[in-house]
Image (cartoon, coloured by chain):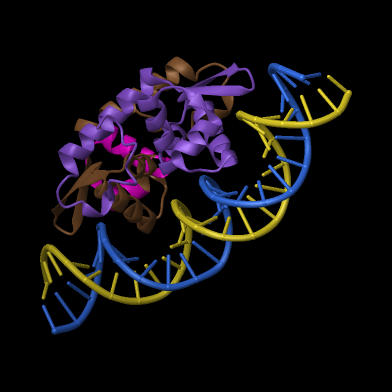
Chain colours: A purple, B brown, C yellow, D blue
Amino acid sequence: MKYPSFDHFFMTLGNRHRVRMLQLLNIEGPQSVNSIAKALDMEQSAVSHSLKHLLQCHFVTVKQDGKERIYAINQDTVAPLFRQIRRHIEKYCVEGCEHYWETEKEAHYDYQR
Amino acid sequence: MKYPSFDHFFMTLGNRHRVRMLQLLNIEGPQSVNSIAKALDMEQSAVSHSLKHLLQCHFVTVKQDGKERIYAINQDTVAPLFRQIRRHIEKYCVEGCEHYWETEKEAHYDYQR
DNA sequence: TTGTCATATGAAATATCCATCATTTGATCA
DNA sequence: TGATCAAATGATGGATATTTCATATGACAA
């Protein structure tokens, strides 16, 4: 018998680009690879590589649309995770944790602001 | 104005040792650094380094007890996160995701089994 | 077909993280 | 104080992940 390992899924979320991509997909809705790359000022191949990780963990889904592939967030489970982390941060890490914080510009796609 | 970055917190959870430590603390209760090291067959300094990360994210708390420091899990927020990830895995990643799974021995401290 | 656009893939360079060792700090007690 | 045990810290080599570039694949339309 085998069991899943949590750390792999958390590790996939433990990356600034991937989190920003999820936040983008959540706020702006499903979109293509190029669209994501443009919005987040990333290389196409970097976006593609990152999406592969997110896809493997089922944090996003894809569907083909002509030449494009439209990626969508798996809101069902990603949203609760983000909500939980946000709750944790607000409860425990607001004061005395300045070094964890980022500027407004960098945080443009922070979730549910 | 500044905003927190989620990825840092997820990254801290995205590590096998740290997840196992949290699972241990959850199942067996608060304990010292040496005790954790012995239980998980880790070096004292490795445990200490890992605990520092968990502490910075407030996933654990400490209290001094004589020469020892007793670490405890922050159940209030870690438990829901783990529950959520487990739910996600069970719902989306049980079939066709064999490569994500670990053996029973490695998973000894998987959460709430 | 052939050309074009969108995306994926592979491999090499780079950056980042982690394990380990030696050392230091800190608490306790004789 | 000095001895002892517990834990933290710092530095560094090695492992792992990410970025980047070049190229391949795949869909579509002419």
Q: In this view, does A100 lie above or below A74?
A: below
Kindly identify the residue that appears in the image at 30 percent across and 32 percent down: A111
Tally of numbered tags: 0
In this image, B6 relative to A52: left or right? Answer: left
Identity of the residue drawn at 50% across and 18% down: B94
Main SS class of the magenta portion in the image: helix
Magenta region includes residue A24: no
Which corner quadrant holds the C terminus of chain B?
Answer: top left
Residue shown at 17%/41% (left/top)? Answer: A92
| Magenta region includes residue B35 | yes
Residue at coordinates 29% horizontally, 46% vertically from top-left? B54
B59 or A90: nearer the eye?
A: A90
Where does residue A89 sit, x and y in percent of width and height? 22, 39
Q: Quadrant of residue A99?
A: bottom left
Which residues lie in the magenta part?
B14-37
Can you see residue B112?
Answer: no
Viewer-closest of B74 and D6: B74
The x and y percentages for residue C6 are 61, 29
Image quadrant of residue B59? top left
Could you tell me if residue B36 is visible in this image? Answer: yes
Question: In the image, residue B31 lies at what x, y percent?
Answer: 24, 45
Front in this rendered view, residue C9 or B88? C9
**Nearest to the observer: residue B22 or residue B84:** B84
Q: Where is residue B35 in the image (x, y as percent from the top left)?
A: 30, 48
Q: Is residue A106 left or right of residue A68?
A: left
